[in-house]
Amino acid sequence: MKQFTFDLTQNSDIPLPQANIRYFSHFIQTEQAENVLRILTNELQWRQDYIRLYGREHKIPRLQAWYGDVGTDYQYSGLKMNPIPWHPLLLQLKKRCEVECATLFNSVLCNYYRDGQDSMGMHSDDESELGIEPTIASLSFGQPRILIFKHKSSGKRHKIELEHGSLLVMAGATQTYWQHGIDKTRRNVAPRLNLTFRHIKRVIKRVINSV
Ligand SMILES: O=C(O)CCC(=O)C(=O)O
Ligand SMILES: [Fe+2]
């Protein structure tokens, strides 16, 4: 499989207080990003999941897929996801993100926003499985959509347009102090595919059967 090349000249820190966020607009060249979008759209095992809110089932407004090493089960909004074994292209992208972030990832949440009615509510990726101050690498493909950051106590907002082939890295205290999400839009927009690479701490269950 072809290796991807990266233009690291177009990167910038997003200077938000109590956060550590970096953005690389052309992390993956446009033409290669086209291929990634096409391959992952067709080959990942996308599913429509539901969450239970106040006793009622709701469709999650996007398609999702969870890939990762064995043992990286993940709980998202009360939804338990068991990882699918790695797709080779996801592994390749994971490695590139690991080099850039100087950290290891063992799982990825894949999100597919079919149109402007697909969205992601404001949240922090602060589940205990992610550990303290997790580093999360987020790759975007297809239709650029706006990621909104909202500070948990001041309410201050900041918007970043996540472009085709871009990498957004959230690290340090970002998840402690900020929420992020993607609003719906009335505009007629094309599909968007997003990958958030994470490191899940394994829960080692020990069975003690002697005294
Ligand atoms: O689609 C995005 O850019 C946001 C994804 C995200 O926040 C998540 O998967 O936790
Ligand atoms: Fe998130």
Image (cartoon, rainbow, N blue to C red):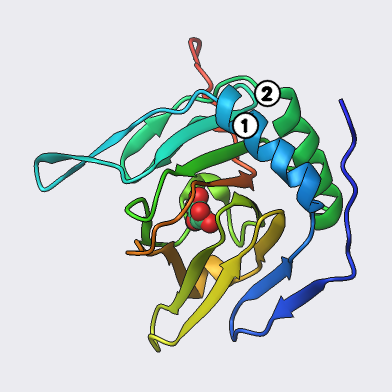
59 with respect to 177 (left or right): left
* Label 2 SS: loop
| Residue at image point 53% right, 25% down | 83
- Can the viewer see residue 72? no
Residue 40 marker = 1
* Quarter-of-image position of residue 70: top right
Asked if residue 49 is positioned above or below residue 43 in the image, the reply reads: below
- Mark 1 vs mark 2: give the one in front: 1
Q: Quadrant of residue 47?
A: top left
Q: Is residue 63 above or below residue 71?
A: below
Pointer 1 with pointer 2, Cβ within 8 A:
yes
Quick one: label 2, few (<14), some, or many (20+) residues within 10 Å?
Answer: some
Residue type at mark 2: give it: His
Q: Which mark is residue 133?
A: none
- Amino acid type indicated by mark 1: Leu
Q: Considering the numbered disc 1 on the image, is that residue within a helix, a strand or a loop?
A: helix
Q: Residue 68: where, in percent of width, then height?
A: 62, 29
Residue 139 percent coordinates (x, y): 66, 51
**Is residue 137 found left or right of 27 in the rendered image?**
left
Q: Is residue 60 left or right of residue 32?
A: left
Instruction: Tell me the residue at 47%/25% (across/down).
Output: 82
x and y percent of residue 149 in the render?
48, 74
Q: Earlier in the sequence, mark 1 or mark 2?
A: 1
User: Residue drawn 40% across and 78% down?
Assistant: 152
Above or below, 184 against 40 in this view is below
x, y (%) of residue 141? 63, 49
Separation of residues labelled 1 and 2 (CA atoms): 9 Å
Single out the residue that lies furthest toward the top. Answer: 209
Image quarter for residue 167?
bottom right
The numbered mark at residue 87 is: 2
Check the picture and name the quadrant holding the N terminus.
Answer: top right
